[in-house]
Amino acid sequence: VQLQASGGGLVQAGGSLRLSCAASGRTFSSYAMGWFRRAPGKEREFVAGISRSGGITYADSAKGRFTISRDNAKNTVYLPMNSLKPEDTAVYYCAARSSGSVTALRAGAVDYWGQGTQVTVSS
């Protein structure tokens, strides 16, 4: 499986971006999908995840501002991000777990990583 993330960019605080992650392969619908991020000087952290059945979980930092969704017909997962803050600045990575468990994915049990897309929020 190959994951191609896109949609990052430079935005002012309070603005919005929508990240997309397109996956190759015919088994996308069976995967748990998610987003992680790594800010400068920090460890990579979980942001949001969606199971193969549509169950969703968010990091506290993302609740109320980010919304993860998936389109199995397009093999794509989305992450619209609103009310962005400077502390959201990071490289955002798409992730996939073949077992479909978003709980395990959230804990870092990831089978496939995308290449990352830079999000920069200016104050």
Image (cartoon, helix red, strand yellow):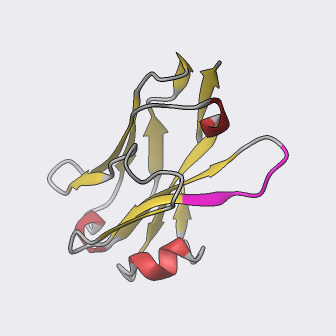
Whether the magenta-drawn stretch holds residue 14 is answered as no
Residue 92 vs residue 44: left or right? Answer: left
Q: What residue is rendered at 39% in x and 33% in y?
A: 82
Q: What residue is rendered at 51% in x and 60% in y?
A: 60
Q: What residue is rendered at 39% in x and 83% in y?
A: 99
Please tell me in which quadrant of the rendered image residue 121 appears: top right
Total labels: the figure holds: 0
Please tell me in which quadrant of the rendered image residue 15 appears: top left
Q: State the residue in front, 32 or 57.
A: 57
Residue 45 vs residue 67: left or right? Answer: right
Taking 64 as reference, is 43 above or below it? below
Q: Where is the C terminus found, in terms of image quarters?
A: top right
- Horizontal and vertical percent position of residue 38: 69, 48
Q: State the residue in front, 54 or 21.
A: 54
Give the magenta part as a residue range. Answer: 41-46
Residue 121 appearing in the image: yes
- Horizontal and vertical percent position of residue 88: 60, 38
Q: Where is the N terminus found, in terms of image quarters?
A: bottom left
Taking 48 as reference, is 115 above or below it? above
Residue 13 vs residue 15: left or right? Answer: right
Residue located farthest toward the right when viewing the structure as drawn: 41
Q: Main secondary structure of the magenta part?
A: loop
- Horizontal and vertical percent position of residue 102: 40, 75
